[in-house]
Amino acid sequence: MRAVVQRVKRAAVTVDGEFISSIERGMMVLVGVSTEDTKKDMEYIGNKIVGLRIFEDEEGVMNVNAADSGSEIMIVSQFTLYGDGRKGNRPSYIRAAKGDVSEPMYEDLIRYVESKGFSVARGKFGADMSIDMVADGPVTILLDSERGF
């Protein structure tokens, strides 16, 4: 499982002009599921999301996690995180899990993060979404359960 975590001042998702969800200060997390992901991968990413210390303390040091900073979390599925552009100019998505596998894993991740005390805003799985966000910092962190970062 892969995730791109961005610290944001705010973020909102719409689909065909219809409001889906939004957050204020917090984390915008784009998540991709691979064909080989298991519950262990989902839990690894979930623990990283809730544990990342990317919010500033009183001294301006990034030393505070989302819970301790009172931040919100939005999780949006994005299969293109498994795009492989090494050959040619059109990315291959062979490693990206199909919807029947990735949607339950995406929902499990949301439930897992919610079980840690968060109310999670979300995108609309499989939809062509418009995401408006204001990056904060910018702070962007890449997570990959297979590679352990």
Image (cartoon, helix red, strand yellow):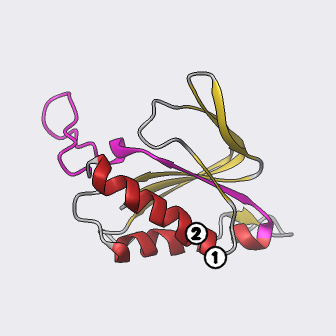
Q: Relative to 17, say whether 60 is above or below.
A: below
- Residue 122 x %, y %: 59, 49
- 66 or 55, which is in the foreground? 66
Report the amino acid beneath label 2.
Answer: Val
Residue 83 percent across, percent down from the top left: 27, 42
Q: Secondary structure at mark 2?
A: helix
Badge 1 density bin: few <14, some 14–19, many ≥20, Cα 10 Å: few
Q: Is residue 67 above or below residue 136?
A: below
Side of 42 relative to 56 (left or right): left
Residue 73 in view, yes or no: yes
Q: Which residue is mark 1?
A: 116
Measured as percent of width and height from the top left, residue 108 is found at: 46, 66
Is-magenta flag for residue 82?
Answer: yes
Task: Give the main secondary structure, helix, strand or loop, of the magenta stretch.
Answer: loop
Q: Is residue 119 left or right of residue 96?
A: right
**In the depicted view, which residue is nearer to us: 138 or 93?**
93
Comparing 51 with 88, the one in front is: 51
Query: Label 2 belongs to which residue?
Result: 113
Question: Marks 1 and 2: in contact by CB < 8 Å?
Answer: yes
> In which quadrant of the rendered image does the N terminus lie?
bottom left
For residue 102, what is the image quadrant? bottom left
Q: Residue at x 77, y 48 (%)?
A: 24
Instruction: Name the residue: 52% across, 75% down.
Output: 47
Horizontal side of 1 relative to 51 (left or right) equals left
- Is residue 33 in view? no
Q: CA distance from mark 2 to mark 1?
A: 5 Å
Residue span colored magenta: 69-96
- Residue 44 numbered mark, or none: none
